[in-house]
Structures are given as C-alpha cells and as structure tokens.
Image: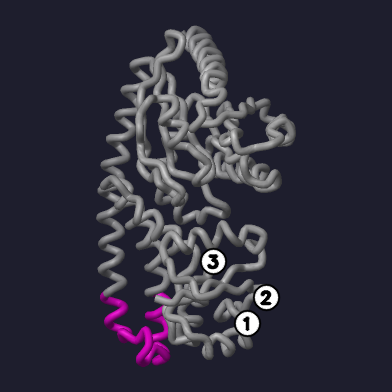
C-alpha cells in the first residue's frame, strides 16, 4: 500500500518523530509534504487537493486531528482512504495491546473516533451526497451507528469492571502499607528498561512507540523498605484527549502513586529534552497528578557528551516544583543506586507525613 503523509507545519520541527509514528503502522511511505494553511472544509487547501489527484498513492495519512466533516470531505474529494493522527496512534496501541483491558481501552477510543464520522456520513447521506464512494446509504449508516452505540455501552461496562478490580488491588497495596512509585515518560525514553533495572525482570523493550500499554507492577526492596514500582503507558506530543480518557484506567496508577519517576531521553537535542519534560508536566497536570513529588531520570547518559549542561537546563525547568533530577543509564546501570536513594528518601518523607496526618486525625 502506497502511503502519502501530510505533516502540519506545527510538527515540522519534529518531522522524523511524526514519520516514525506512521512507519510503525505503514512501511511503504512514498512521500510526505508539510501543510501550511489549512482549509476548514476539507483540511487541505483546494490547490493542494487538486495537485494530489495526480499523485499515485493509496492512502493519505494526515498527522493532525481532523474534524469529522474534514475527514469525510477530504476522502470524498480525493476518492482515497484518509486517516488522521488519532487513528495512527490507536493503530500503534492495537499492535502492542497485550491484555484484555488494553484491547478494550483501544476499542473504546476507536468507537469514540468512529461515531462522529458515521454521524457525518448520515448527514451527507440525507443530503444525497454519498453516492458511490463512502455511500452505504442513509439507513445503512443509521443502523451502523446504533450498533456502534450499543457496542460502546458494552465496552464501557466491561472496562468499569476491570477498573474496579484494579482499584481493589491498589487498595490492598495501600492497606498492606506498601508505597507506590509510578514510572512515566515520553514513549521510547526507556521506562520499561528502568522498570527492568529496578526489579531485575526482563520485560519486553523495543524502539517501537508504546511497547507498554498495560501497567506492570512489581515489589522492590531497598534498604529495608518495600515498595511497588509500576511501568505505565508512554506519553506523546499532543496526545489526543480521546486517548487520555480511554486510558484513564491505566493512568490512574500514576494518580494513585506516592511519587512519580519521569524518564527522559537525555541523548536527544537539548531542546527536545526540555520539550519532553514540559510534555510530561502537562500530561501529569491533565490527569490530576501534577502535585505529586517527581524525580526526573535523565536516561541514556552513556550517549551524552555534556550531561552537566542537560542536568542544569532540566533543573531550571523543574525548580518551581522542587523536583529532583538524576542522570542515569538503564542499560549500563549508571546511577541506578543514586536514583533508588532519591526514591527511598522521598518515600520515607511521604510515609512520615502520612503518619503525622493520621495522628492528627486520630
């Protein structure tokens, strides 16, 4: 399948990152182009749409969030299949789903993605404008819409049951007095590698985005302190709200944690390192975990020439929150003990404050 990729101007500085996301799903990228001005009706400007009609490709991937009307209009104009950034991310998720919960979360996100498109198709069918291409007919689309709505309700019910099971497990950990550390970070930063380094396990790691979709939890002992470490789903630039909401059951592990370890790929350009830190802070804010104590683990320092500069710049960006910054290498086990010391200190401090609060309530 010949795939053509449209990159919005705002993502042009991150071109390779965006193309890497597409390649995770489609290998045969024939070309890409950057979109400057967009069109409210069909996203692409009219002259660009006309130009593409003479280009040999099978599918257009637009690495932006399209409105349902834009996606349908663009597909009608080009007579080609069109997918946007949300669907690409969901396809990547589907390729890495390893549990029933992850599959259901992806299914829910896909349903939320598809339902507005079907509604838009119903609107065009009523106007008699969906003959041939995309033309299942008004009644066909209306029936399909009702089937999807019923499926959405079923998936939500099943996810709620799994969410209750996860909540019960967290409650049991709290009652056992076990503190909880959540590992977060940008996709491919090395979260699972850190999880393996801390636990001694060998969970799958890889260069593909979103290798981890279902949280992995394991008990760790350090200096007489037992605590639970959880590996979570990776962050990404401008992660769509639909994905955040669908994976909220997974991200609850972060909300319920005592401390958060944000893994950052320090081997990237300094501007990209800072961007990863800011993206992590924004997502923690969106899920209600911004007030948690955070340790920023600058990973892959074995590939960095001047880690002192990176440490100084990241420290500036987290100074307001008074968070710690540690330079590590998971694969070379550089400063893993230093990171454990930082985690130990924060957990002991959190435990002391919790006991003081309980004494006051008593």
In the rendered structure, find residue 10 and report the number of the disc placed on it: none
Q: Which residue is mark 1?
A: 45
Q: Which residues are magenta?
A: 119-143
Secondary element type, mark 1: loop
Q: Residue at x 31, y 84 (%)?
A: 136
Relative depth, front residue between 222 and 122: 222
Q: Are marks 2 and 1 in contact (CB under 8 Å)?
A: yes
Which structural element holds mark 2?
loop
Q: Which mark is on residue 63?
A: 3
Q: CA distance from mark 1 to mark 3?
A: 16 Å
Please provide percent x and percent y for residue 158.
25, 48
Q: Quadrant of residue 115?
A: bottom left
Q: Is residue 278 above or below residue 115?
A: above
Pointer 2 or 3: first along the chain: 2
On the picture, is 130 further left or further right than 323? left
Residue in front for this viewpoint, 134 or 47: 47
Residue 308 % position (x, y): 72, 30
Mark 1 or mark 3: whose residue is earlier in sequence: 1
| In this rendering, the label closer to the viewer, 2 or 3 | 3
Q: Secondary structure at mark 3?
A: loop
Whichever of labels 2 and 1 marks the residue nearer the N terminus, that label is 2
Residue appearing at x 42%, y 85% in the figure: 124
Q: Position of residue 153 (x, y in %)?
A: 29, 57
In the picture, the disc for residue 37 is 2
Location of the N terminus by quadrant is bottom left
């Amino acid at each position: 399948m010949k795939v053509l990729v449209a990159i919005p101007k705002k993502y042009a500085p991150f071109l390779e990152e965006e193309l890497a996301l597409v390649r995770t799903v489609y290998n045969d990228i024939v070309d890409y182009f950057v979109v400057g001005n967009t069109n409210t009706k069909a996203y692409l400007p009219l002259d660009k749409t006309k130009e593409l009609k003479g280009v040999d490709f099978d599918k257009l991937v637009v690495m932006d969030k399209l409105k349902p009307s834009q996606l349908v209009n663009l597909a009608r104009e080009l007579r080609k299949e069109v997918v946007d950034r949300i669907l690409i991310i969901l396809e990547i998720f589907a390729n890495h789903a390893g549990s029933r919960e992850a599959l259901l979360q992806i299914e829910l996100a896909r349903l939320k993605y598809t339902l507005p498109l079907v509604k838009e198709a119903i609107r065009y069918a009523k106007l008699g404008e969906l003959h041939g291409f995309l033309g299942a007919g008004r009644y066909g689309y209306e029936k399909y819409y009702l089937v999807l709505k019923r499926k959405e309700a079923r998936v939500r019910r099943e996810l709620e049951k799994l969410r209750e099971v996860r909540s019960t497990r967290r409650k049991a950990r709290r009652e056992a007095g076990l503190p909880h550390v959540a590992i977060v970070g940008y996709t491919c930063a090395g979260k699972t590698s850190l999880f393996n380094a801390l636990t001694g396990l060998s969970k799958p790691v890889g260069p593909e985005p979103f290798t981890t979709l279902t949280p992995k939890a394991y008990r760790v002992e350090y200096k007489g302190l037992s605590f639970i470490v959880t590996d979570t789903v990776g962050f990404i630039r401008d992660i769509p709200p639909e994905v955040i909401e669908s994976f909220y059951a997974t991200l609850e592990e972060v909300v319920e944690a005592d401390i958060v370890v944000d893994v950052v790929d320090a081997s990237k350009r300094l501007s990209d390192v800072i961007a990863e830190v800011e993206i992590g802070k924004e997502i923690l804010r969106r899920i209600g975990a911004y007030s948690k104590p955070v340790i920023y683990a600058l990973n892959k320092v074995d590939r960095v020439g001047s880690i002192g500069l990176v440490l100084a710049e990241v420290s500036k960006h987290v100074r307001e929150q008074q968070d710690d910054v540690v330079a590590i290498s998971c694969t070379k086990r550089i400063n893993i003990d230093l990171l454990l010391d930082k985690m130990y200190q924060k957990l002991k401090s959190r435990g002391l404050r919790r006991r003081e609060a309980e004494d006051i309530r008593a």
